[in-house]
Image (cartoon, helix red, strand yellow):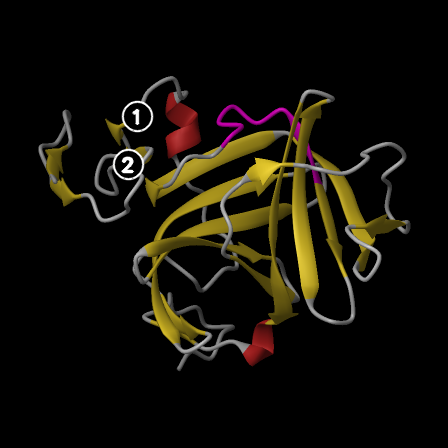
Amino acid sequence: MQIYCPICGRGYAQKLKDTWLVVCDTCHHLVKGSGLEPDQLMMPDDWSNIQVGTTGLYKSQNFTIMGRIRLQMKNDFRNLWCAQYGQEIMWIGQSLESIGFFKPPFAPYPHNFDQIRAGVNIEFSEQIKLKCELVEKCIEIRYEGELSPFPFPMGNFNLIQASNAAGNTVLVFHQNENSIQFLWGEVMLVYGVTFNNTKTWSQWETK
């Protein structure tokens, strides 16, 4: 489906099966979607060499980065990249040291949420336990590109990150006791992942 920016007229062909938001990369206005503030559509530069259009391979299947959600915390930020993965959607969580691949969609958190804090274990089953590494409040959120639905578009949530030695990882988005969503996936070191069509910075070596 072809859509056009109402400000500059640039055309976009929607590629995701459940497109929720499209931000014009020319004039930074909404092409599709509503309810966001103008400053949420302005993406600051950061250290990431991933960009919209970056490609890669995960579990023998190609993916293409379509959009980004940038979560600003008090002392740090996280990039959550939306990728087309075959006919499905995959979210890629990026921090300084690791990359998380999350194939299932956002889903209601099914476990007890009480007393989750950094350093404690989260039990997902009798066999799977993850150590909570991060609990931080998202104080600002920004968007670019084409994105699948995100359950907390205005921010105002706590982000919980946990993982284990087996490579399991989870991102939990906690707004209140009735609004808790999570993504389940696999985590690996950034040096174990190869991306193509990346942004070139002087401090990065890109392949």
Residue for point 52% across, 33% down: 141
Magenta segment: does it hold 39?
no
> Percent x, y for residue 23?
29, 36
Give the labeled residue for mark 1: 33
Residue 7 spot, x, y in % from top left: 15, 26
Crowding at dot 2, Cα within 10 Å, few <14 / some 14-19 / many 20+, comes out as many
Q: In which image quadrant can residue 168 be found?
A: bottom right
* Residue hosting label 2: 22
Marks 1 & 2, CB-CB < 8 Å contact: yes
What's the amino acid at mark 1?
Gly
Q: What secondary structure is marked by label 2?
A: strand
Q: State left or right for residue 91 relative to residue 131.
A: left
Q: Residue at x 24, y 38 (%)?
A: 24
Image quadrant containing the C terminus: bottom left
Please report the bounds of the magenta region as a residue range.
151-159
- As helix, strand or loop, the secondary structure at mark 1 comes to loop
Most common secondary structure along the magenta stretch:
loop
Q: Is residue 152 rendered magenta in the image?
A: yes
Numbered marks: total: 2
Q: What separation in Å lies between label 1 and label 2 (alpha carbons)?
A: 7 Å
Q: Earlier in the sequence, mark 1 or mark 2?
A: 2
